[in-house]
Image (cartoon, rainbow, N blue to C red):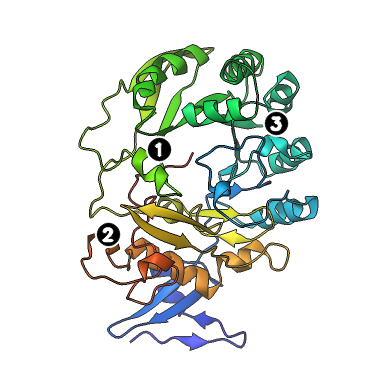
Amino acid sequence: MTELTIGINGQIQLPTEYLTRFGLKPGTRFVLESSEDALRLYAARLDVQKAYVEITARCNLNCAVCVRQVWSDPCGDMSWETFEATVEGLRAFPDLNRLVFGGYGEPLVHPRLPQMLALASTLGVSLTVTTNGLLLDEAMARTLLATPVDWVVISLDTVHTQAYNGARIVGGLDQVLDNARRLMRLAESRPVPPLNLGIEFVATRSNRDHLLRLREIAADLGATKVLVSNLLPHTEAMCDEILYDSDRPLSLPLSWPVKEARGILWGRMDLPRMKWGAWRQCRFVLDRTVVIGWDGGVSPCYPLMHSYPYYIYGRRKNVSRYVLGNVNDRPLADIWQSEEYVRFRAKVRDFRFMYCVDCGVACDYAENNEDCLGNVPSCADCLWAQGIIRCP
C-alpha cells in the first residue's frame, strides 16, 4: 500500500519510488480530491503552454453583437505594473510557448503596447496579436515587426463592416485590407521569425454568402489561416442570426496557395462544428491555457473571464466571471497550482458536468451557469467545449 504523508508545510508527499514510476520530480505539489467512490491525487505541475493576456477591455469599435453591449463590467487598460507581474509570473512555466494579446478588447488601443511587446519578447516565446485591423497603420506594423510577433489575426466580417459605418469610418473595410497588405509587404524584409497572417470570421445567417469570398480574400492578403466561428447571441434578437443549428452544412473551399520567401504554403480554412453533440472537450484546459484579464484576474478560459448573458437554443444564460486569483496579489505559479484551480481543470478534463442542453427537466440551474451536480460555474452547455464557438 502506498503511504501518503503530509509535510510540515501541509503539502502531500509521495515516496520517491512512486515519483520515479510516474515521471514526477521531487517537490511536485499534489492536490487531493475525495468523492463517494474514489480518492484522486492530482499533480500540480507548472505546465502552462499558452497564455491569453487582455491588456485592455476597451475597443475603438462598437459592434452591435459585441458582449460589451450587454455586460456591466468596467472597461479599462492593464496597468504597466500588472503587465510586469504577468510577464514575471509567466517565467515560472518552462513549457510556455505562446502568448496571445487578445481578450475582449482591441490590443492596439493600449498606449503602452510597444513596451509590452518588448517586455513579452524577453520570455522567448511566440507572440500573437489579435486586432480588428483599423489601427494597424505603417507605424504600428513596424512596431509589431520589431518584435518576435509571428501571428497577427485580423477580425474581418460583416459585423465589423456595420461597425465601421456606425463609427462613421469611411472605407473601413478597404482600410483594413490595405493595412493587412502593407503589414505582409513589410514583413518580407524580416526573415526571422516569418510573419503569419490569420483571419477570424464570425458566421451568421446574414453573412453566410460572404463566406464564399474568404478564400479569395485570404489568398489576396497572404493569409495562411481563416478561423470561422459561430455567433454567440447575447440578445433574443440575435438568436435569429445563429447558424449552428442549421441543417445546411458549411461547404467551403478549405485551402489555397500562399507564396512566401521559402516557397509555397497552403492556407487552410478552420471551420466550427455546426451541431450540438456528445463530444465535449475544452481546448483551454487541454492546451494548458491560462487567461489573464486587464485587471490581473486569472480565469481558466475566455467564456469565464467576464460576466454577461447569452442565449443557447433560445434559453437565456447568465455567466458570472470566474477568477481564481490575481497576479497583483499572488504569483501566477501559486494561482495555477492552487487546489481550486487544479481541481477545476481535472473536472473539466473528465467533463464531470451534466448535459443541460439534452436534459428534459425544467430547472433554473443552467440559467445561472450552474448544474444539478453542484458545479458553480458549470461547463455543461459550453459552446466553446462543443467547438461551435472558436477563439484564435
The number of numbered badges drawn on the structure is 3
Q: Is residue 372 left or right of residue 24?
A: left
* Residue designated by label 3: 147
Look at label 3 and name its amino acid.
Thr
Label 2 residue SS: helix
Q: Position of residue 297 (x, y in %)?
A: 64, 61
Look at label 1 and name its amino acid.
Ser
Image mark for residue 357: 2
Q: Residues within 10 Å of mark 2 (few under 14, many from 20)?
A: some
Q: Nearer the viewer, mark 2 or mark 3?
A: 2
Q: Quadrant of residue 74 in the image?
A: bottom right
- Give the quadrant of the N terminus: bottom left
Q: Position of residue 164 (x, y in %)?
A: 60, 26
- Residue drawn at the location 47% of the way across and 66% of the way down: 24
- Residue drawn at the location 67% of the way across and 25% of the way down: 136
Q: Position of residue 91 (x, y in %)?
A: 66, 53
* Residue designated by label 1: 229
Q: Is residue 168 above or below residue 118?
A: above
- Residue drawn at the location 61% of the way across and 14% of the way down: 178
Label 3 residue SS: loop
Of 37 and 103, nearer the camera is 103
Q: Quadrant of residue 295 in the image?
A: bottom right
Q: Is residue 196 above or below residue 308?
A: above
Q: Quadrant of residue 17 in the image?
A: bottom left
Name the N-terminal-most of marks 3 and 1: 3
